[in-house]
Amino acid sequence: MSLRTKILGLVEILLRVPPLFVIDEILKIGLGLTEITEYDLSEFEEKLDDSTFNFSTGTVSYDPTFYRFIFVSLARLLLSTAGCVVALCLFVLSTKHLMVVYMYLMSLGIVFISYWTNFSTMKSVVAALDNDSGISSSVLEDILSLNFNKLMDPKGYAPIVVQNYLVQCLLTFIFVNIHLGPRYPLVQKLLPISFLAPSILAILPMPTSVLTHTPVFAALLPLALVKFVLWASVMSVIQTIYNGYLHARNFVSNFGMSALIEAEWLRLSVPEVLRTFWILRVLEHTGIFFLNGLWHEVDDLTPIFRLMKNLMVTGCDTLTAVLGITSVVSYICHHIGRLFQWVMLTEDENDKSIGTVSAILFYILALQTGLTGLEPEKRFVRLCRNFCLLFTALLHFIHNIVNPLLMSLSASHNPSLKRHLRALLVCAFLVLFPIMLLIYLWSHHEASTWLLAVSAFSIEVIVKVAVSLAIYTLFLLDARRETFWEGLDDYVYYIRSFGNTVEFCFGIFLFFNGAWILVFESGGAIRAVMMCIHAYFNIWCDARAGWSVFMKRRTAVHKIESLPEAEEEQLRRLDDVCAICYQEMKSAKITRCKHFFHGVCLRKWLYVQDRCPLCHEILHSVECEDSKENDNNREVVPPVEEDDTNFNR
């Protein structure tokens, strides 16, 4: 990517940041709703108590102050909502239209800055003339009389006029080049005169009444151009909005809503914009921190830690700020995942979703803990706890990367020792770090629901790593055996069953832990919804899937036990390999159709169907109707099951 492309991309990101600051400021004031303090509530109760009841009409008359308060609050809410909607519309505009909007806003801002500087200058000139001990003189007279002492007098108004003249020259140059109004030659010539007229009149012997009103007349021409552009662009704005609506509707009808969201997400570079917004916001609060002198406060905290604590607290006080820090967390977690991928020398595309999943998890934790509505000290503690929970979840994501790598390495006959050591090093980290984390947390914190949740996640990841290492060891031993290991499948099944059972028990424990938090600590709709999702996917679905696997295995074992065992003489005469795994048969089961297979291989086959792999005859006595249904509904070739050993090789 060329430097010019990078710069243009950065500029486009920066152009979309200001609307986020607008939304952030609106959210800081609570969408315009002023908080009703206890004093206000008591005052309203007194007003209501003083209400009078009219027996003739049956009506109650209240003090109008209450209704005025409600009206003002609703008006602020509507204005704040409209401001958020306008900011979002600006955010989704194309770069071309966004540049037009910024040029118009800059033109309008220049007009008001010009008026404000002219008004301040004329106010200073009039005050200086009134205090000139009754001697009416002007800058022009001082210049003609070569009265340099008065011209250079700091208490005079000549330096102020010169300063305003230079500022107005700069504003004139910018406005002439960026305004969107008609560029007639006469208008272009009158614009500099309009901006500079107050500064020019200030050096002439003019009455103070004229000088006082010159800023208003000077702003008329540029303000008229700005208003003309606004009224002339109404139809263009409506047409742009309508075209955007048609484009979105056609896109949704052709590709679906998810495709539209993904396309707009990439076009707007939402993660990069949110990260840039949050970084600029942090820089803003850093400047405020130093300007307020908080760096030199005397307390038990070091200045650096005090600064970091202040930035963390102020960096998540609104929903937009939480989105910004979520984007930063996603970026960091993504590169942590890439780091472990580099350590393990793997490039799995599915592992690149670590950043996305981490961002979703962090944002859900922020919402269900009410992070934005907490007091600063409580918010800092809650944010640290959320980061701790996120990191334990990140350990699970890393295990999801290393587990398939271990399985593939264990099945390789000529593996690289370097890759084995790297994978085992990551496993050692996944075991040692949670242990050290638990020791530190339990020695420095009292028992709480949060600490129990972190402990459950940490112990769970240790158990999962132990299960992966056990299966990895079994597969390594099997890869180096010269004969078929018939008991391997049973060992793998028992180990995985143990790991899944522990994980299921921790899922139930976390559900009750969350229920305790919901009832006794901090309830909320988001937490209740997340608990329902956890109960369905991590408890109900896992229990149903585990029971289904158990019943399939149990049924298959009963069917295999009902088949006769092949004798050594039969195997010697047959002198063949198993048609499923292509391994030599030291022991075998004989089907009804007189075919020989390993008992373990045949049991895995029975997980899928009751037909012989060779002749498709029924392996076990079943009803004819069921067999016909199985012919229609089942595949002939079995898919790879989770408990397969030799099928994976």
Image (spheres, rainbow, N blue to C red):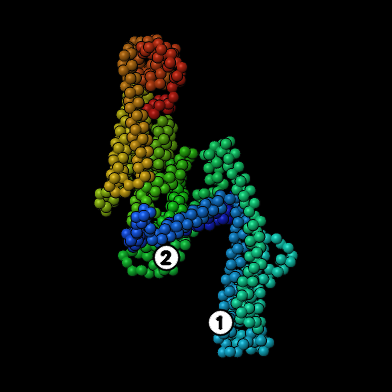
The residue that appears at 33% across and 17% down in the rendered structure is 560
The residue that appears at 63% across and 53% down in the rendered structure is 234
Residue 431's disc is none
Quarter of the image with the C terminus is: top left
Judged left or right of residue 282, residue 388 is: left
Gap in Å between the C-alphas at discs 1 and 2? 38 Å
Q: How many neighbours does mark 1 have within 10 angstroms: few (below 14), some (14-19), or many (20 or more)?
A: some
Q: Which residue, given by chain and number where applicable, does mark 2 sit on?
A: 289
536, 568: nearer the viewer = 536
Figure check: 378 above or below 505: below
Q: Secondary structure at mark 1?
A: helix
Residue 45, given in percent of the width and then of the height, sits at: 33, 59
Q: Amino acid at mark 1?
A: Ala
Q: Residue furthest right?
A: 185
The residue that appears at 39% across and 26% down in the rendered structure is 644
514, 630: nearer the viewer = 514
Judged left or right of residue 496, residue 91 is: right
Quarter residue 178 falls in: bottom right
Figure check: 592 above or below 288: above
Residue 644 visible in the picture: yes
Q: Secondary structure at mark 2?
A: helix
Is there CB contact under 8 Å for labels 1 and 2?
no
Q: How many neighbours does mark 2 have within 10 angstroms: few (below 14), some (14-19), or many (20 or more)?
A: some
218, 18: nearer the viewer = 218
Q: Which residue, given by chain and number where applicable, does mark 1 sit on?
A: 127
Residue 276 visible in the picture: no
Quarter residue 428 falls in: top left
Residue 161, given in percent of the width and then of the height, sits at: 61, 78
Mark 1 or 2, closer to the camera: 1
Quarter residue 492 falls in: top left
Residue 550, given in percent of the width and then of the height, sits at: 32, 25
State the count of labels: 2
